[in-house]
Amino acid sequence: MSERGSHDSPSLEEIIADSSGGELSLMLLLLLLVTALSILAIGWFARRRRGAEPSKPTWGFEVILAAFGLWILMQLVGGLLGIAVVGGSRVAIPPEEDPMVLIASLVGGGLFSLLFAAGLLKLPAWFGGEPDSLAFSGSMVRGLTTGACTFLLWLPGMISTTLIWASGLLLLGFDLEGEQQQVVQLFTSLSEKGSGALLSLLLLFAVGVAPFVEELLFRGLLFRWLAARFGVGAGILFSSLLFGAVHLEFSGDGLLFGALGPVAALGAVSAWLLHRNGNLWACIGLHATFNLAQLSMLLLN
């Protein structure tokens, strides 16, 4: 047993080190059961809240390539313009000391991503397909509330999948101590400094802009195209893996894998929600509530 103070809670790494193979297997089975029950509950709830049937994609893979290419371009252009506004000479300063460069980059990229999102509705028609609603097939309010309620149903599963993923990485020898996404680090730094205006701006980006644009791209376009051609299971798998991969970040020691599993799981649940419910607003509501919950926990801590 590792030595701890009488009031210290054991870390996940210590629990794994102190557990036998049988205990770890039992823990894994229980966590998988919790995740499966969460997914089944989401499927049942989403089906009961189902609205109008979304249209079937009539366009080809070239629309997917064009959409992702334009999204990356818009992020780069917007980010560079944001940096230019606050002064490129400040790029070398660490974000925790001068967060304005990172904020300007996020805001600039976010604004240009919104312009990209507005054009997405016309993109299929530009490539010879039928005009497409991208699964905006029901009430916005009903969809957003469905997504928020879905997050509550996913919460036990989210905790379970996060523990499974973190345990797997620790068993493989990854060091997860201090791993945080850049936006999370920035939000923590701003909350410690009491920068209310900048916090509000970052919150708007994380809860409003990012969920709207990413759900349009990954669920409205990519998942629906994959599901129509290769089946729902393949659509969920590949769209969620790509969704997790684009959220990978680099540090001085290499790639940060800690967020890959939980983010990919969110992508899978969001795709499952769209399949069962049919309204992309529900996916946006789920994603926005997920981000809001994460940032709220940082503020409370």
Image: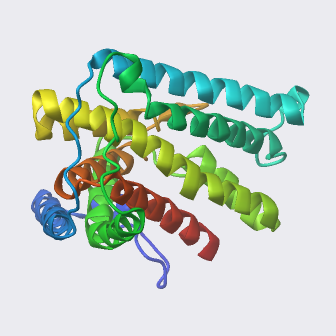
**Quadrant in which residue 60 is drawn:** top left
Where is residue 204 drawn, in percent x and y? 64, 57
Residue 3 image point, x, y percent = 43, 71
Residue located 13% across and 27% down the image: 229
Placement of the N terminus among the 4 image quadrants: bottom left
Task: Work out whether residue 22 or residue 4 is closer to the camera in this orientation and state it.
Answer: 22
Drawn side of residue 26 relative to residue 158, left or right:
left
**Residue at the limit of the structure toward the bottom, as seen here:** 6
Left or right for 151, reference 190:
left
How many numbered dots are placed on residues in this image? 0
- Residue at image coords 62%, 51%: 205
Placement of 129 over or under 163, stated as above or below: above
The residue under the point 53% across, 37% down is 118
Residue 188 position (above or below residue 127): below
Residue 195 seen in this snapshot: no
Residue 200, quarter of picture = bottom right
Q: Nearer the viewer, residue 105 or 64?
A: 64
- State whether residue 131 appears in this view: yes
Q: At 54% across and 71% down in the image, what residue appears?
A: 297
